[in-house]
Image: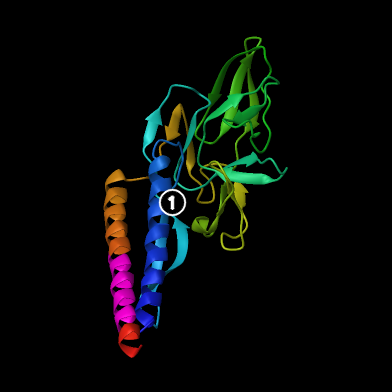
Amino acid sequence: MLGPIFNALTGLKNASQRLQNSANNVANINTPGFKKSDVNSVDIQSGGTRVNDVSKSNTQGGLIPTNNPLDLAISGNGFFQVTNPNGGTSFTRSGSFKQDGAGNIVDASGNALVPAVNIPGNNTGISVDSSGQISTQVDGQPEVAGQIQLANFQNPSGLSAAGGNLLNESAASGAPDVGAPGEGGRGTVLSGFLEGSNVDITEEIVDQIVAKAAFKANINVIKTNDELLGTILDIKS
């Protein structure tokens, strides 16, 4: 008698997590470089479904032109590397970079680009080519300021969320394979563009409708079985 109730509870948890996940995707639809998450469910032997895992979709987001040379998008595979608040290295597809007060290239949150790049204050222009080379004009003379390196992973979907738009290496992702853009399967860099999120609002609306329907159906199962159980207990008493 309690079996259907337990199965419905599992279904409620599944539907609830799908709704929460979809809400987070929609909230980040305008976040540069954001990769949507997908909730993967499996059937359980006793009946019902449960969440198996939550994975990142690494499909390419659309390109948004900005005309800012330090707005960078990756065309293809790979992640930018930045320092994180713990002193380690995190990874991101969000290439919204700028200079801080000391001339260091940092992301929108102030995390420094890895490897570090410093551009003197007396520069008259910054450019970034497809191979990630950062150049500038200092006192009218061209100068190479630094080189962007991208990190590839055997399983990028296994990267763990680190807050904001940062990701961390995990056992599931494997170790980073770091090198120049355009080499070793890494994508190229596009200056003056940002990669948009890969969230499809239509898919999210459909997913929310399905999850809400499942939530309601499981509530009804619990309610019906609770009433039936109450009737049986009343008869026995």
Position of 103 relative to 216 (above/below):
above
193 or 108: nearer the viewer: 108
Q: Check residue 224 for magenta coloring.
A: yes
Residue 1 quadrant: bottom left
Tell me the chief SS of the magenta region.
helix
**Measured from the top left, where is residue 165 in percent x and y?**
53, 42
What is the crowding at mark 1: few (fewer than 14 residues within 10 Å), some, or many (at least 20)?
Answer: some
Position of 11 relative to 100 (above/below):
below
Question: Amino acid type of disc 1?
Answer: Asn
User: Which residue matches tag 1?
Assistant: 58
Determine the residue positioned at 61% across, 63% down: 171
Relative horizontal placement of residue 74, taking residue 148 as reference (left or right): left
Q: Quadrant of the C terminus?
A: bottom left
Determine the residue positioned at 63% across, 35% down: 113
Relative horizontal placement of residue 204, taking residue 137 as reference (left or right): left
In the rendered structure, which segment of residues is drawn in magenta? 217-231
Determine the residue positioned at 32% across, 66% down: 219
Relative horizontal placement of residue 71, taking residue 175 as reference (left or right): left
39 or 219: nearer the viewer: 219
**Residue located farthest toward the top when viewing the structure as drawn:** 139
Q: How is the image coloured?
A: rainbow
**Residue located farthest toward the bottom when viewing the structure as drawn:** 236
Position of 131 relative to 141 (above/below):
below
**Measured from the top left, where is residue 236 in percent x and y?**
34, 90
**Residue located farthest toward the front when viewing the structure as drawn:** 237
Q: Check residue 152 for magenta coloring.
A: no
